[in-house]
Image (cartoon, coloured by chain):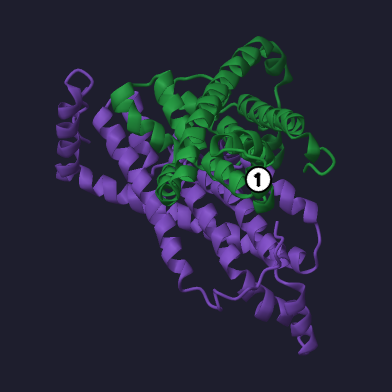
Chain colours: A green, B purple
Amino acid sequence: MTPTLAQAAAEVGIDWGWVFGHVDEMWERTVEHVTLTGVAVVVGFILAVALSLVAIRWRATYKPITWFTGVLYTIPSLGLFAFMVPFTGLTLLTAEIGLILYTLLILVRNIVAGIDGVPANVVEAARGMGYQSRELLWRIEVPLAMPVIIAGVRIATVTTIGLVTVTSLIGQGGYGVFIERGISRRFLTEILVGTVLSVSLAVLFDFLLVRVGRWVAPWTRKTAV
Amino acid sequence: MGSPVDAKDGGVMDLFSDVSDFVTDPANWTGMITRTLDHLWISLSATLVAALLILPLALYLAHYRRAEFLATSLVNMGRAIPAFGIIGLALPISLALGLGVGYWPTFVALVALAMPPIFTNTYTGVTGVRRAVVEAARGMGMKDGEVLIRTEIPLAMPLIWTGLRVSAVQVVATATLGAVVGWGGLGRYLIDGFAQGDDAQVLVGAVAVALLALFVDALFAVGERFLPGDQTADRFSSVTA
């Protein structure tokens, strides 16, 4: 039986009563979503810095590192979570391992590209002023690489926020709970709420990170994208 | 179906023997083949349909340098909109239109998700072709359509291909979520495995899905070598995107 267009339109309408009745749960899910994302990006960033230092120090390792993180990035998210389920169960740890692995490719690529992009004459000038390699890295190269590094953090954060919706399927909360429940109840409003909240959170964090970028690299303020 | 077993009690060795039981049981073979082929087929058709829908628009807009803001904002939007949300939203819409659960909501969501990478890469590729090359083509008497077909598209081919590759891999990944809206495909092993606590099934599904995504990515990597045109030419202006 094919419903008429009017019936279809009525069925896909938004139930505002449900929306206003679930503000508390939305807040709860926001806290879960932000926590899942935050832990993944922070831990991912620390690991990416370590991998990037290895790649910069020993050039030959860069290709294998990006190849390996690239393979991880290509594996579907639900598949990556599922890999760990037999060993770590339907747990927070499973979700975080998957999310962290996903951030690595983007972050390592941007950190290394940022450092590589520091103009050679600046590096020469710093050496001429007596900077040793460690000082050179942390006081000259890393600050100058900041805009590119922050760009990587922005992409990683926005991507992770989207991926966290999937972690509800392994029982870890976040906005995906709305989507999953909405699917099983065939209830558009709930699915829409989960999706819109996730997009809004991504936009908000992207905006905040742009501000952070201007703060750590003030010279980009006028030209920042 | 293989017998649902709980490997957690028996440790890793039991898990692996469960997996090998599952894989060597002929009763599971047709399922594995059907699900893999279904998964490949929906991914291929969704990517193709998306390309047919969005390529002409991207080429047209890029050739005339229109809607440049769209090209940049689409990448960011593509990242911010969760694939799971799109596939979820496609379900009630598909139901309301009488298309049912399973195939259609999955297919529609996949087509929608495949379009942004194809659009942005094509747009960037065509607008990135050196102005001097385009002017030379015009100087040789080519009309707009010829410039596009004989100069801009061949030179933008590597990036257009990258767009198709990114889309296809993303589609294979997202098709896994089709199991949540009642479609088959390899995602079934994961969703059913989670629900039944059947770790062997979960692991088989995870490996299959990962291999399929890597396989499709590798196919595109090999295909890149057979693209027409001179792949070493210095065809792009130094600033792209």
- Quarter of the figure with residue B60: bottom right
Picture coordinates of residue B188 (x, y %)?
A: 36, 37
Position of A81 compared to A192: left or right? left
Q: Observer-nearest residue: B208 or A177?
A: B208
Hey, which residue is sitting farthest right in the picture? A222
Marked residue chain, label 1: A
The N terminus of chain B lies in quadrant: top left
Answer few, some or many: residues within 10 Å of disc 1's Cα (few below 14, many 20 plus, some between 14 and 19).
few
Picture coordinates of residue A93 (x, y %)?
A: 41, 21
Picture coordinates of residue B113 (x, y %)?
A: 59, 47
Q: Which residue is mark 1?
A: A128
Against B60, residue B213 (above or below) is above
Against A13, residue A62 (above or below) is below
Position of B14 compared to B190: left or right? left
Residue type indicated by callout 1: Gly
Hey, which residue is sitting farthest bottom in the picture? B140
- Quarter of the figure with residue B155: bottom right
Q: Is residue A79 visible to the viewer in this orientation of the structure? A: yes
Picture coordinates of residue A220 (x, y %)?
A: 78, 40
The residue sitting at 51% across, 19% down in the picture is A173
Q: Secondary structure at mark 1?
A: helix
